[in-house]
Image: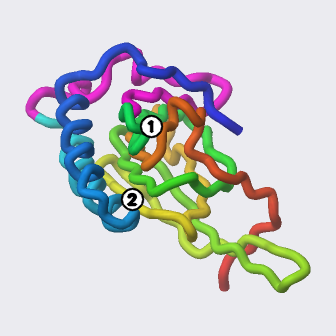
Amino acid sequence: MTPPATVGSDRLTERMAALVSEIRAVVDRGLPPELTAYLVGERLAPHLLTAPDGPDALLTPAQREGDPQRYRQHVLHAEADGSFSVVALVWLPGQHTPIHDHVSWCVAGVHQGQESETRYRLVSDGRSSRLVETEHLAGPAGTVAAFAPPGDIHLVRNACSTTAISIHVYGADVSRLGTSIRRVYRLPADQER
């Protein structure tokens, strides 16, 4: 399931343009994916919480709009060389992703509201596969998660009764691909005991 996308949603705020510049400086170093994701997460974190310039200084009103049918993806920036994209995901109450993994390294930071994440591990006996729930995390505003494939299988949902917004940075051109999702998993899921 690909969320509805708005490519180049409106314009970049000054704060978002500054964040894009900081991300570019990290990505241009050409470091391994895990380290790149970690360092991008460090740059994203200070931009998530309310700053002296106000809570709306990171996103425009159009970039904060949800969709009543499913979570909404606003592609804010895609680097010309395809090396990274910045996306705002807007989640109305109860909205969630399918269980999925990603095409590249990823950093996700909660900007508003609270999200929950359930992580999974794929287990196979050679004949069949299943997902095993390994971790459940609650992410209030300001929370940042950084990871790189493989081992990035998860489900994310809005965990609050109001709109949640998260900023995602991917090591791929989401404006070209349409999504950061590599694969959706429709396998049985067990809780790890």
As rendered, which of 7 and 80 lies closer to the eye?
80
Does 70 sit above or below residue 145? above
Q: Are marks 2 and 1 in contact (CB under 8 Å)?
A: no
Residue at 44 percent of width and 63 percent of height: 147
As rendered, which of 51 and 28 lies closer to the eye?
28
* Kind of element beneath mark 2: strand
Tell me which corner region of the image, top left, top right, bottom left or bottom right, holds residue 8: top left
Residue at 63 percent of width and 45 percent of height: 97
* Kind of element beneath mark 1: strand
Q: Which residue is mark 1?
A: 164
Please tell me whether residue 143 belongs to the stretch shown in magenta.
no
As rendered, which of 162 and 76 lies closer to the eye?
76
Quadrant where the image shows the N terminus? top right
Any part of residue 166 in sight: no
Magenta residues (range): 52-78
Please tell me whether residue 72 belongs to the stretch shown in magenta.
yes
Q: Amino acid at mark 2?
A: Ala
Tell me which corner region of the image, top left, top right, bottom left or bottom right, holds residue 192: bottom right
Any part of residue 188 in sight: yes
Q: Which residue is mark 2?
A: 145
In the picture as drawn, the residue positioned furthest to the right comes out as 127
User: Is residue 160 toward the left or the right of residue 34 in the image?
Assistant: right
Residue 173: x and y in percent read: 48, 38
Residue at 73 percent of width and 71 percent of height: 131
Q: Amino acid at mark 1?
A: Ala
